[in-house]
């Protein structure tokens, strides 16, 4: 149940962005806070995009491609990853291709589809763009370690729950991984064969396999 003064089911019927209602519920205020943080991401990404002559989704695709395996770097998966339509991704890929920032790899078994990989120019562009979220990181670095751990625990659970409820289509956290198990009170990775402390839980694990 919500930790606020209004029970969650009643709160959900209210206008969540009405400050009078919102201010009576910690959950309501957290939702408002998350919305503000999402604006910070948008602003930082737009600033970088404008400076480099790319769109925000083009930057997101480049950075994602730099750090994920080719089976995730195709139109279908990228559309799910960024919650946009396949035509939106196709347009962005066309623009990146015309700027020589990516290459298309048709070596998969399905000859109709392709993966994208970064060109040398694309790698240079990633180096210039991936710092866009650094101002947020720097702010977090000033927090106490215990506060950061508590915040991370809440965020990782929230992401998993949003995924289970169909709001976030993609997640690669331990909680949804087939190698994850709960051993007594602690979390455990059966691939790494070790207990997972709160801070060991991963949000984007290269070894993740969906349960
Ligand atoms: S393989 Fe990765 S995502 Fe899966 S439980 Fe282990 S650390 Fe977590």
Image (cartoon, rainbow, N blue to C red):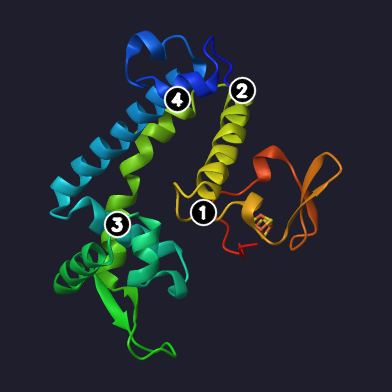
Disc 1 element: loop
Left or right side of 94 for 124: right
Q: Does residue 39 lie above or below 64 as drawn?
A: above
Left or right side of 131 for 158: right
Determine contact: label 2, label 3, CB under 8 Å: no
Is 209 or 150 nearer to us in this picture?
Answer: 209
Q: Residues within 10 Å of mark 1 (few under 14, many from 20)?
A: many
Is 127 or 28 nearer to us in this picture?
Answer: 28
Q: Looking at the image, which residue is at 57% across and 40% down?
A: 156
Q: Which labelled disc corresponds to residue 1? A: 2
Mark nearer the viewer, 2 or 1 = 2
State the residue position of label 3: 84
The image quarter in which residue 160 lies:
top right
Q: Pick the quarter of the image with the N terminus.
A: top right
Q: Residues within 10 Å of mark 3 (few under 14, many from 20)?
A: few
How far across and how far down the image is residue 209, in percent? 62, 65
State the residue position of label 4: 12
Determine contact: label 2, label 1, CB under 8 Å: no
């Amino acid at each position: 149940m919500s930790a606020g003064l209004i029970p969650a089911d009643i709160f959900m019927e209210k206008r969540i962005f009405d400050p009078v209602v919102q201010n009576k519920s910690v959950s309501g205020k957290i939702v408002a806070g998350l919305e503000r943080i999402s604006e910070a991401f948008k602003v930082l990404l737009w600033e970088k995009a404008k400076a480099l002559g790319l769109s925000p989704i083009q930057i997101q695709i480049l950075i994602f491609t730099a750090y994920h395996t080719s089976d995730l770097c195709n139109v279908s998966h990228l559309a799910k990853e960024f919650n946009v339509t396949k035509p939106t991704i196709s347009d962005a890929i066309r623009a990146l291709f015309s700027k020589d920032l990516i290459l298309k790899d048709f070596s998969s078994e399905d000859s109709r589809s392709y993966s994208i990989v970064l060109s040398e120019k694309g790698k240079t562009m990633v180096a210039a763009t991936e710092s866009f979220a650094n101002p947020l990181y720097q702010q977090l670095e000033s927090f106490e370690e215990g506060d950061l751990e508590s915040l991370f625990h809440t965020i990782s659970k929230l992401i998993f729950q949003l995924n289970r409820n169909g709001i976030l289509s993609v997640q690669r956290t331990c909680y949804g991984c087939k190698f994850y198990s709960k051993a007594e009170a602690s979390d455990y990775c059966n691939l790494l064969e070790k207990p997972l402390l709160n801070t060991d839980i991963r949000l984007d694990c290269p070894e993740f396999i969906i349960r």
